[in-house]
Amino acid sequence: MLARRNDLSALKDRFARTSRVLVPGIFEPDFARSVLDTAKQHDGWLLVTRIQGQHREFDAAQMAALPAERLAPFEELVAAEARAGFQYRFERHLLYDNLRAGKLPDGPLRQMAETLNSEAFIALLHDIMGADYVAGETFCDGQLTRYRAGHFLTSHDDELPEFRRIAAFVVNLTPDWNADMGGLLMFTGKDGHVQEAFTPMFNTLSFFKVPQQHAVSAVAPFAKGARQAVTGWLRQGPPPAPTP
């Protein structure tokens, strides 16, 4: 599934200098397209956000069907949380958790979940980061994500000690995307200014050390389609036991 590479030295150098790198052509194009096509057909999306300081999940299709007057109180709660601090609004489908629970059917999504924990993929991440960053056993979790118009993720650093995150990654799946459409992965400095931004080009891998301050800019109302990706983390230690 992984594409052949001859740029590892350049990727390692970039990561060593900035603690982040954008890897082009991460998978074989046909495989990446098959994952995207399957994601487009998926009908079990959950809309995730924070309301009054708590993570909340909603059936995305049901929320999209609500009339504007019914949705207005929800919109205000989401906006109030964003004004107060950390907030997000996007749709997701858990790949790693469903794979562990035996609930991910055969097909491209299962292949993607398995590939993220393959020896080859994890070895590539280790090679890019270098021995100074990685010690001992690691694994990758992952989720399918969809950012529609107005969806966003405010600034945070991904550090949650109980999850033992070493690095984060985004497998970008949307073709014909450009910076004007939003959904940029933005890295910010201590002064609040954006130091660098990655446009989610098709079949690229955004990869960065954790903790690192970053955000996803709001998807523009005129964006063509949705920003689709597989996001996850390289985590320290053995994988959790399968969910019963």
Image (tube, helix red, strand yellow):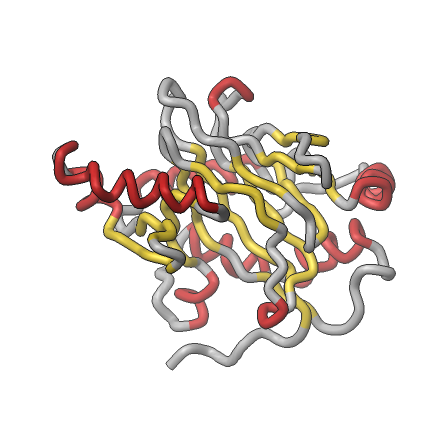
Q: Is residue 114 left or right of residue 234?
A: left
Q: Is residue 48 left or right of residue 217?
A: left
Residue at 86%, 60% (x, y): give it. Answer: 132
Residue at 50%, 36% (x, y): give it. Answer: 173
Q: How many labels does the image show?
A: 0
Judging depth in this view, the residue of 199 and 84 nearest the camera is 84
In the image, residue 57 above or below residue 71: below
Give the x, y percent position of residue 231: 53, 49
Give the x, y percent position of residue 191: 72, 36
Give the x, y percent position of residue 27: 60, 42
Judging depth in this view, the residue of 218 and 172 nearest the camera is 218
In the image, residue 112 above or below residue 197: below
In the image, residue 198 above or below residue 73: above
Q: Is residue 40 left or right of residue 63?
A: right
Quadrant in the picture for the C terminus: bottom left
Residue at 40%, 46% (x, y): give it. Answer: 81
Judging depth in this view, the residue of 101 and 184 nearest the camera is 184
* Occupied quadrant, residue 71: top left
Give the x, y percent position of residue 134: 79, 63
* Occupied quadrant, residue 89: top left
Q: Outermost residue toward the front?
A: 84
Judging depth in this view, the residue of 86 and 231 nearest the camera is 86
Q: Is residue 45 left or right of residue 215?
A: left
